[in-house]
């Protein structure tokens, strides 16, 4: 598969004004449309044709809610997808998921070739302009991640897997240093995979040599670390928070009223009225009724659920 950048300003004819002036199409668009039609996503075929849409495979934190929050587009739709011959691994260090450097040496996901592997995730259709915006979040211009092309299949509406078609994904430029992911990041991967493939989920934590270091399973919302709980709250908002930046922002806000990394989700829920009063007294925005409702519901939920 090609490892060169797939979507760039020069390729899309961008004049730098944010508009897409391209008349070219993403390589293999006919196969993409065939795959989406065969799996009964006919409504998305028109979007592909009209917008020169690019299928982007997310296997890490880029679930559909995270992309909606990052790209400010609530209309984005995630489609169950799988890529063969690539294994999800972890490397670092990464600052974005470090909660403002509260966590040190955090790892994030990447893919490496492995003949026997199958990696599950989701595909979201993005316009070329949205891909360029996503490049900024992925650190493409700083050589943190790069775009590569992989072959994917999608599933949907009771159909068999589609034909393989080309799609874009992001992989780390340097996978040589193994780092464990944060619990919030693991939660993001679980949400991505189980939205597409419901059922029990255990995350293998592997390095670039495919060595299995550990496995992670969701412990229940009330037993999460506080940043992970904040992630789970924010991703369930009607308009999702922009992740992972808002996790840091919320932790900074809580620190103003004495809530730190050692506090539990139950601590926050139990003290939420006092927390809001303290924030208001400091001229800081309080937690909304929507957020408080989500917090209380998750703390009282005994098993993992997506809603």
Image (cartoon, rainbow, N blue to C red):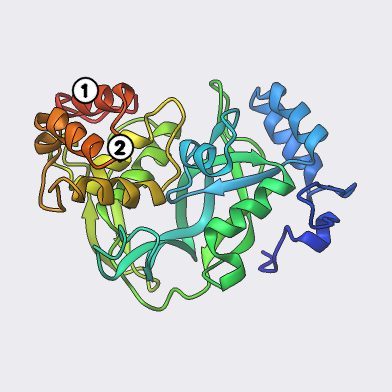
Crowd class of label 1 (few under 14; some 14 to 19; many from 20; radius 10 Å):
some
Residue contact at pointers 1 and 2, CB within 8 angstroms: no
Question: In the figure, is residue 262 to the left or right of 171?
Answer: left
**Which residue position is annotated with label 2?**
232
Write down the quadrant of residue 196 in the picture. top left
- Can residue 227 be seen by looking at this rendering? yes
**Which residue position is annotated with label 1?**
297
Q: Which residue is pictured at 90% across the width and 47% down the height?
A: 23
Foreground residue among 42 and 67 = 67
Q: CA distance from mark 1 to mark 2?
A: 11 Å
Foreground residue among 122 and 31 = 122
Counting every numbered tag in the picture gives 2
Question: In the figure, is residue 237 to the left or right of 168?
Answer: left
The x and y percentages for residue 49 are: 81, 34
Label 1: which secondary element: helix
Q: In the rendered image, which quarter contains the C terminus?
A: top left
Foreground residue among 165 and 108 = 108
The x and y percentages for residue 185 are: 33, 51
Q: Which residue is pictured at 70% across the width and 68% down the height?
A: 4
The x and y percentages for residue 177 are: 36, 77
Q: Which residue is pictured at 23% across the width and 55% down the height?
A: 215
Position above or below: 282 against 1:
above
Position above or below: 226 against 85:
above
Labels 1 and 2: the sequence-earlier one = 2
Label 2: which secondary element: helix
Q: Which residue is pictured at 66% across the width and 50% down the height?
A: 131
The x and y percentages for residue 167 are: 66, 50
Q: In the rendered image, which quarter contains the N terminus?
A: bottom right
């Amino acid at each position: 598969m090609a490892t060169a950048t797939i979507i760039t300003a020069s390729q899309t004819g961008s004049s730098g004004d944010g508009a897409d002036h391209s008349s070219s199409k993403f390589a293999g668009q006919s196969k993409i449309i065939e795959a989406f039609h065969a799996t009964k996503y006919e409504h998305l075929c028109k979007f592909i044709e009209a917008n020169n849409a690019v299928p982007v495979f997310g296997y890490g934190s880029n679930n559909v809610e995270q992309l909606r929050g990052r790209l400010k587009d609530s209309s984005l739709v995630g489609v169950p997808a799988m890529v063969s011959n690539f294994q999800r691994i972890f490397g670092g260090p990464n600052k974005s998921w470090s909660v403002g450097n509260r966590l040190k040496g955090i790892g994030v996901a990447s893919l490496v070739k492995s003949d026997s592997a199958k990696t599950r995730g989701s595909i979201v259709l993005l316009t070329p302009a949205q891909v360029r915006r996503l490049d900024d979040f992925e650190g493409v211009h700083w050589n943190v991640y790069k775009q590569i092309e992989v072959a994917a299949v999608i599933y949907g509406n009771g159909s068999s897997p589609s034909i393989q078609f080309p799609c874009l994904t992001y992989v780390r430029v340097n996978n040589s240093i193994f780092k464990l992911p944060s619990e919030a990041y693991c939660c993001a991967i679980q949400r991505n995979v189980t939205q597409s493939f419901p059922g029990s989920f255990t995350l293998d934590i592997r390095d670039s040599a495919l060595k299995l270091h550990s496995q992670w399973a969701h412990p229940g919302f009330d037993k999460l670390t506080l940043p992970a709980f904040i992630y789970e709250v924010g991703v369930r908002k009607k308009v999702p928070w922009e992740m992972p930046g808002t996790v840091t922002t919320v932790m900074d806000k809580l620190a103003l009223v004495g809530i730190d990394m050692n506090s539990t989700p139950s601590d926050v829920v139990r003290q939420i009225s006092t927390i809001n009063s303290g924030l208001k007294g400091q001229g800081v925005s309080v937690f909304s009724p929507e957020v408080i409702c989500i917090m209380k519901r998750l703390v009282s939920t005994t098993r993992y659920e997506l809603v």
